[in-house]
Amino acid sequence: MQHIDDETLALLALGEDVLDDDARAHLSSCPECADAVARLARVVDAFDGADAADDLVAPDAAVWSRVQAELGLTGGTAAPPVVAPAAVADAPAGPTLPRAAAGPGTEDDGATGTAVVVPLAPRPRRVWVPVAAAAAAALVVGGVGGILWERREVEPPETTVASATLDPLPDWQGASGDARVEERPDGRRQVVVTVDAPVPDGTYREVWLLAEDLSGLVSLGVLDGTEGRFDVPDGLDLAEFPVVDVSEEHFDGDPSHSGDSVVRGPLDV
Ligand SMILES: [Zn+2]
């Protein structure tokens, strides 16, 4: 029969009754496996002393009040019960190697003649499960909140405060478009314009807000492509310039309206 596998040996060292009759017979007659179990058992023994350090301890009262503050709990919320005795402070330090034997290049110093199993020094882990759980919950809440906040930053909730259907002027039969005015929570307004019409070579589109009687106008900017978003200047009264107009412009250096409107429509302000 082959040797007992490592996992089974480890369970055996931990005191688990995992052997069937064949394995038990093998173990009793195989010095190699017996030795392996003995070595593992020494490791287990060495770690027994570390258990005390893992006991749960009560946190300082200030910790709970900080958790309460973080989670927005009301002042009356009592701290969860502590489930383990406080025994960490006196936990003994684990055995450590002498410095000479622990350092590099000291193998031939002969400081130790036998192999020493060095357990990890027990650390006073002041873990308190309810606090850890609350802190984890705070992290999750904070993380989700942060993600939502970032989305808010990227896509602020805009309200459409006015809209218009843009109809073609006589020279532009077949053209169409629409416009809407969006307002952000901070009061910033934008006009979103969509136009479906051919753009002849050597021309471009410009978006305007016109007075209803066409006595005045404000340029919002150049429309590149079929859709554009334009800031409405602060303080501009849309009721004074309620007509959205898209003109065909030529590269002639003249910043004024060409007089050749493609589509136009009144906002329902
Ligand atoms: Zn064996």
Image: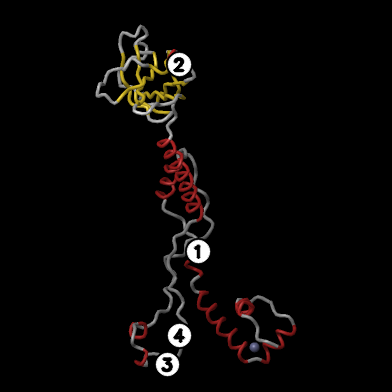
Camera-side mark, 4 or 1: 4
- Residue 79's place in the image compared with 235, above or below, is below
User: Which mark, residue 113?
Assistant: 3
Q: Earlier in the sequence, mark 1 or mark 3?
A: 1
The answer to whether mark 3 is within 8 Å of ligand 1 is: no
User: Which mark, residue 168?
Assistant: 2
| Residue displayed at 35% across by 6% down | 213
Contact check, label 1 and label 2, Cβ < 8 Å: no
Nearer to the camera, 1 or 83: 1
Query: Badge 4 is on which residue?
Result: 116
Nearer to the camera, 161 or 137: 161
Residue 17 image offset from top left, x and y in percent: 68, 77
- Residue 192's place in the image compared with 236, above or below, is below
Which quarter of the figure has residue 246?
top left
User: Which mark, residue 55?
Assistant: 1
Q: Earlier in the sequence, mark 3 or mark 2?
A: 3
Q: Is residue 220 visible to the viewer in this orientation of the structure?
A: yes
Secondary structure of residue under mark 1: loop
Q: Is residue 164 visible to the viewer in this orientation of the structure?
A: no
Camera-side mark, 3 or 2: 2
Horizontal side of 14 relative to 46 (left or right) equals right
Secondary structure of residue under mark 4: loop
Camera-side mark, 4 or 2: 2
